[in-house]
């Protein structure tokens, strides 16, 4: 075994994807090499944190009803969309270079959804429509900003690796992004004319989620 | 004259010698190049037939860029792989098993010149199976553990009773004919075709058409940006279904005994009523419209949100989608 373990081998070890013999060799090396040991356990810790995150953060059905009632009661405020956060796939060689930024983006969105679910879920009975509406309004702006940041980060990463994508993937990616960007633009323009429209808010955030998915899928494809 | 003749002979001899030396030199160079050049990257096809032991609930990771992956389950504690693989010097078929985990396929490092590999794989019934491909098609049937399947542009076909399903493709068509507690299906431009007894379903697409045989779906979230969504059949009693589309038409082709309480929130879209509905306009002060109506006693709940889609409600002929038969 070379002086230090390769990144690929460390990732396979963190993913439990090595044969027993290889695993033994890696662990033997880790036991004696501080540098590899730190890298290996940092990777495993990162994956552990990701696996600990819920795959979906769904509010209870009673909460959906409550939120819907709040929206109906305060029509000038936007609806919250409490949906599953984008899921991150890790393959043995996939997204090695992007693991940390993508993990951060995924964790951010999961944490956001979880916070909102807990925050609203702890109060299924609305105290007052006005309070809920004020909180919903503030949260919507925050949620949209975070979606925009996350998509922009992924777009930047993809620009850097675009040349490595197969032409067919680029064509699919561009086609999807064109549809999504047009839909986002249309929904945002409409929302500017009618702030707080819950249908528009919901549709806008759904399109953001899809854009994140498309970008993540393309990033996955880059290292297939 | 003699001097001239000798000189000419020497010159001819020199030319011949030079020619011989050049030939020897060129031949030697060719041989050296031939012996020292690395093996070419051209793909070569090989038949495989391998088997490894595995735990009954093994997690299997399968990777194949081009060609096909066909997975079937059996009641044995082993994984068997057969088929043909296209290999290069860098990209070779691998199979490893450590009891609880196994990985097999071609982990591509340089796809240039890589031909299609066709893998036929048998896995234990309770396996959890993870598959990733570029353009290779994926066909999975009979696996009772979880499935996590991704292809960039290959079609994906899933049948049986997987515990949960997660399937994604950018451009490939995903067909799910299964009974499962959870299914998450996502495409970019690829079509989605879905049917079976599904407790909790999410199907989202950017522009692909979505066809759902919905008689046995309990909870569903179906989303599109501009792809058509078509729901056919009836509704499970107390089903809760949520449809969101920016611009793609949403069609409900319903059995005469369908029963649901509908709410349609639309900004610029409309309702195409071919059922004869009694529609109530919502009292919202917002722009756009909220339309409410019931079909039958209204035992299921259907919520539709659109920006500018047309929502059609019509009676369907009593027939189901042409889905492939379930394998169990």
Image (tube, grey):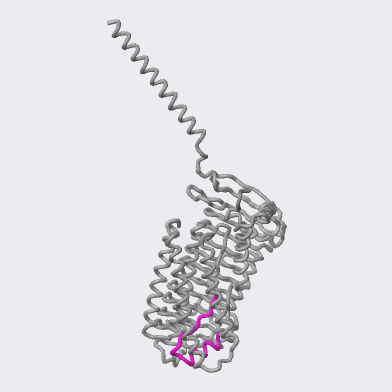
Residue B93 or A216: which is nearer the viewer? Answer: A216
| Quadrant location of the C terminus of chain B in the rendered image | bottom right
Task: In the rendered view, tell whether residue B238 sits above or below residue A159.
Answer: below
The extreme top residue here reads B2
Residue B12 position within the rendered picture, expressed as x and y whole percent measured from the top left: 34, 15
Is A66 placed left or right of B290 in the picture?
right
| Quadrant location of the N terminus of chain B in the rendered image | top left
- Magenta span: A64-84
Task: In the rendered view, tell whether residue B137 sits above or below residue B280.
Answer: above
Is B122 placed left or right of B44 in the picture?
right
- The quarter holding residue B139 reads bottom right
Based on the picture, tell me whether residue A94 belongs to the magenta stretch.
no
Task: In the rendered view, tell whether residue B255 sits above or below residue A157.
Answer: below
Residue B138 at least partly seen: no
Based on the picture, tell me whether residue A81 belongs to the magenta stretch.
yes
Residue B169 at least partly seen: yes
Residue B25 or A56: which is nearer the viewer? Answer: B25
- Residue at 50% x, 37% y is B37
Residue B317 or A36: which is nearer the viewer? Answer: A36
Residue A179 position within the rendered picture, expressed as x and y whole percent measured from the top left: 40, 70
Residue B184 position within the rendered picture, expressed as x and y whole percent measured from the top left: 56, 70
The extreme left residue here reads B1
Residue B305 position within the rendered picture, expressed as x and y whole percent measured from the top left: 46, 81
* Image label count: 0
């Amino acid at each position: 075994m070379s002086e230090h373990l390769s990144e690929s081998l460390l990732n396979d070890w963190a993913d439990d994807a090595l044969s027993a013999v290889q695993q033994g060799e890696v662990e033997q090396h880790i036991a004696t090499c501080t540098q590899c040991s730190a890298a290996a356990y940092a990777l495993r810790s990162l994956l552990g944190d990701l696996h600990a995150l819920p795959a979906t953060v769904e509010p209870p059905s009673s909460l959906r009803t409550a939120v819907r009632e709040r929206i109906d009661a305060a029509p000038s405020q936007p609806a919250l969309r409490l949906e599953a956060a984008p899921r991150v796939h890790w393959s043995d060689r996939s997204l090695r270079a992007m693991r940390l930024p993508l993990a951060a983006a995924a964790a951010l969105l999961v944490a956001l959804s979880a916070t909102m679910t807990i925050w609203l879920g702890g109060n299924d009975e609305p105290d007052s429509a006005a309070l809920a509406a004020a909180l919903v309004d503030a949260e919507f702006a925050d949620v949209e900003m975070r979606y925009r940041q996350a998509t922009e980060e992924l777009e930047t990463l993809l620009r850097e690796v675009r040349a490595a994508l197969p032409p067919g993937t680029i064509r699919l990616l561009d086609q999807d992004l064109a549809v999504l960007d047009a839909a986002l633009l249309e929904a945002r323009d409409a929302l500017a004319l009618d702030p707080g429209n819950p249908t528009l808010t919901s549709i806008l955030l759904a399109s953001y989620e899809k854009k994140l998915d498309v970008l993540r899928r393309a990033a996955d494809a880059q290292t297939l | 004259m003699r001097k001239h003749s000798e000189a000419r002979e020497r010159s001819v001899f020199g030319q011949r010698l030079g020619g011989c030396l050049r030939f020897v030199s060129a031949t030697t160079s060719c041989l050296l190049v031939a012996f020292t050049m690395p093996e070419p990257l051209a793909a070569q096809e090989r038949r495989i037939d391998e088997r490894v032991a595995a735990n009954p609930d093994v997690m299997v990771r399968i990777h194949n860029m081009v060609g096909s992956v066909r997975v079937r389950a059996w009641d044995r504690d082993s994984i068997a792989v057969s088929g043909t693989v296209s290999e290069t010097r860098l990209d070779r078929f691998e199979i490893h098993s450590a009891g609880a985990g196994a990985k097999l396929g071609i982990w591509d490092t340089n796809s240039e010149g890589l031909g299609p590999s066709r893998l036929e794989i048998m896995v234990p019934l309770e396996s959890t199976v993870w598959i990733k491909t570029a353009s290779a098609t994926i066909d999975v049937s009979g696996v009772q553990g979880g499935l996590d399947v991704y292809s960039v542009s290959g079609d994906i076909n899933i049948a049986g009773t997987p515990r949960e399903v997660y399937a994604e493709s950018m451009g490939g068509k995903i067909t799910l004919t299964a009974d499962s507690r959870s299914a998450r299906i996502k495409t970019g431009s690829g079509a989605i075709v879905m049917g079976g007894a599904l407790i909790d379903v999410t199907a989202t697409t950017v522009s692909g058409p979505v066809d759902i045989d919905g008689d046995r779906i309990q909870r569903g979230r179906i989303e599109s940006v501009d792809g058509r969504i078509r729901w056919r059949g009836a509704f499970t009693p107390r089903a809760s279904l949520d449809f969101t589309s920016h611009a793609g038409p949403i069609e409900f082709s319903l059995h005469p005994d369908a029963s649901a309480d509908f709410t349609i929130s639309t900004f610029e879209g409309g309702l195409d009523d071919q059922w004869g509905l009694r529609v109530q306009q919502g009292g919202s002060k917002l722009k756009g419209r909220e339309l409410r109506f019931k079909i039958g006693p209204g035992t299921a709940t259907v919520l539709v949100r659109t920006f500018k889609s047309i929502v059609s409600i019509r009676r369907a002929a009593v027939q189901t989608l042409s889905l492939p038969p379930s394998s169990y």
